[in-house]
Amino acid sequence: MRAQPKASHFVNGRYVEDRAGGQIDCVYAATGEVVARVHEATDAVVEEALAAARAAGPEWAAMTGTERGRILRRAADMMRAENRALSEIETLDTGKPLQETLVADATSGADALEYFGGLAGSLTGETMQLPGGDWAYTIREPLGVCVGIGAWNYPTQIACWKGAPALACGNTMVFKPSETTPLSALRVAEILKEAGLPDGVYNVVQGRGGVGAKLITDDRVAKVSLTGSVPTGKKVYATAAEGMRHVTMELGGKSPLIVFGDADLDKAVSGAILGNFYSSGQVCSNGTRVFVEKGTRAAFVDRLVERLRGVVMGDPLDEAVNFGPMVSQEQMEIVLGYIEKGVAEGGTLAAGGRRSNRPGFFIEPTVFTDVTDDMTIAQEEIFGPVLSVLDFENEDEVMARANATPFGLAAGVFTSDLQRAHRVVRGFEAGTCYINHYNGAPVEMPFGGSKLSGVGRENSKLAINHYSELKAVYVGMGDVEAPF
């Protein structure tokens, strides 16, 4: 085993093991090889993590924001210094190419730690002057113990996207990675400890849904932040609501990408590649419904298919490889099932459509044409390298079709007409939109969805509002009048 951690969990500043928990195999998706094993958190481990987070809260919240921020920024520097080792863990954990993880995973996590570390010292309240000399002020306070539940496509990034704003605001956290990718968050927790984070402030426990359920129903938990599918999000949201817990839900989508005839064709094709085949299509915001104006469709498809000849499959640890496998055999089978449905319902395969003839869970980058809005592949989130091309004739038509979905995570438009671009973006029913680009997620920009795609926002200054609350204080300066 090539990536075996020191123990399964990181609780109260130390690695913890309890082999009574169910075994979880970490499978290298490129070969099917088991590269590490961890154990699910037992009730005792869950209790230790929650108790540690609760106990660490007062001391951590009492520190100044500047002191907390200094630790987060130090951890960011340490992550950048260790980027290659972290990226190799991420590749073994997810199967994503090292060429990608070197620039998009631990680096993004470090950006979050640095950004929110920088904000921590600026988190203040306001004062309000009132008639008669009275006044009021607000105090920004942490929520308490936060639970983060991660997805398997960006485990290092998500561990930091949830942890950084929570810790900057003075909260503590118990983070549960996806059982498919259990490794990365352990090293994040260890780095935070090495950077000076007090014991118990950031804890990692492993497990499947049962462990997550124990965490989100505990009375000590004030906040739940989930990255996952819409069905999982509905269950977690409903459960959290029973305890009136704060929530952030970053869920899935079936996002539209519109290409007008006046768009720069190469840029539009690049955007479609980023929005469908990066991370082998395993990105929640992917623009998998690509609407192309009829007069441009043939040229767009030809250029896209030509560009896909540049795909290099192989061992993701080889930096020459730019396209990796599905994260698991189960996910590969789900995606292959959708491809079969696409063919059965009348879609035309312009590229790909098969499992690659190599070890591991590889699927060829797949492009469907002749797709209609009612096909399954145009309705449901696939979470794999499957792009659907749909025709349109005019702006009003395509906007109605683009928004005809219960999801609303992301949307994009390629056009050289900037007036139209901004008009289209205003019309999108989506939380994260792109003009002449796709799938960028800088920490300075809010990220999140509308409709069934989520609640709240990750990243940016807005995330502070989701990990803190304001206490309002009225100060009377004169006589107090009463009716009797």
Image (cartoon, helix red, strand yellow):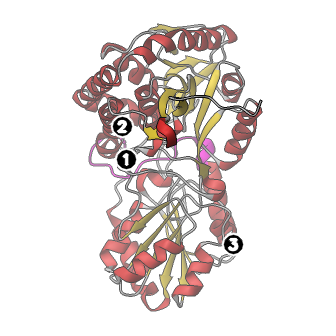
Find residue 479 and report its horizontal and vertical position in percent.
58, 28
- Between residues 472 and 192, which one lies in front from this camera angle? 472
Rendered image: mark on residue 21: none
Q: Is the stretch drawn in magenta largely helix, strand or loop?
A: loop
Q: Secondary structure at mark 2?
A: helix
* Mark 1 crowd level (few <14, some 14–19, many ≥20, 10 Å Cα): many
Marker disc for residue 112: 2
Between 213 and 368, the residue placed more toward the observer is 213
Query: Quick check: 8 left or right of 120?
Result: right
Amino acid type at circle 2 is Ala
Check residue 314 in the rendering and tell me which mark sits there, or answer none. 1
Quadrant in which residue 23 is drawn = top right
Dot 3 corresponds to which residue?
Answer: 375
Residue under the image location 65 percent in, 60 percent down: 338
- Magenta stretch bounds: 313-332
Residue 454 locus on image (x, y percent): 61, 50
Residue in the image at 46% along x and 78% along y = 423
Residue at image position (77%, 33%) is 242
